[in-house]
Image (spheres, rainbow, N blue to C red):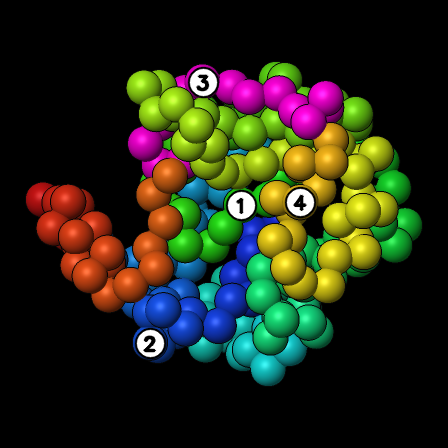
Amino acid sequence: MSETIILVMAAGQSRRFGSDKRQACLADGQTLLMATLSQVMPCEVDWRLLLREDDDPAALLGDDFAREHARRIWRAPQAGNGLGASLGDAFRQLSEDATLAHVQVAAVWLADMAQIAPQTFHALHREASAEHVVRPVLTGEKGSPGHPVLFGRTLWRELAALEGGEGAREVILRHRDALREVVVSDAGILDDIDTPAMLAERRRSLPPPNA
């Protein structure tokens, strides 16, 4: 899997949440961002974390984690223009990084989606290639694609040109012939947290610490 990388998109403004949801705590004591990273790292591929330019990694991740993974932290100068703009920042850096020239597939994983199972990523990865877009669809939820979405290298130039708008969605629509959808039973592919009410529901659904 050395030819694949995961881009964890954590440069959003959390406007609907009303505060920095990345630091909101779940029932098990983890912050939302760290809970997502705890699902990403077992996937056993390289990864990068996209943060805003003014973010303090130590405050978000803890001193030790931030130091250990400093090389994996990228910045999104256009973060204020929305997810599409941040994706543009991410794919420009990915395309220009000579140390990642071997990478052929990039998975976009939103930082507020902490319930996606690593096994789901592996199921998607088996269908991925440099020429395809691969995304999951939940069993019984016709027409409800989820995350992460894996983009082959042939689409990166268009993704790198994004400056806002609908972001990757418009790129996918232009390349429907390259799209592969994988049916999975993992409800985490649709489970993001946009509001405090959604966070409260998540806390109720998780067991308490040391349960």
In percent of the image, x 46 and y 36: which residue is there?
146
Q: Amino acid at mark 4?
A: Glu
**Dot 4 surroundings within 10 Å: few (below 14), some, or many (20 or more)?**
some
On the picture, is 141 further left or further right than 77?
left
Check the image and report above or below for 145 versus 97.
above
The residue stretch that appears in magenta: 176-189
Q: Give the quadrant of the C terminus.
A: top left
Q: Nearer the viewer, residue 153 or 144?
A: 144
| Vertical comparison of 178 with 78: above or below | above
Residue under circle 4? 170
- Of callouts 2 and 1, the N-terminal one: 2
Real-space Cα separation, disc 4 to disc 3, in angstroms: 22 Å
* First-in-chain label (4 vs 3): 4
Which of the two labelled residues, at mark 2 and mark 3, occupies the earlier sequence position? 2
Mark 1 or mark 4, which has the lower sequence index?
Answer: 1
Residue 93 drawn at (x, y percent): 79, 58
Q: Is residue 180 shown in magenta?
A: yes
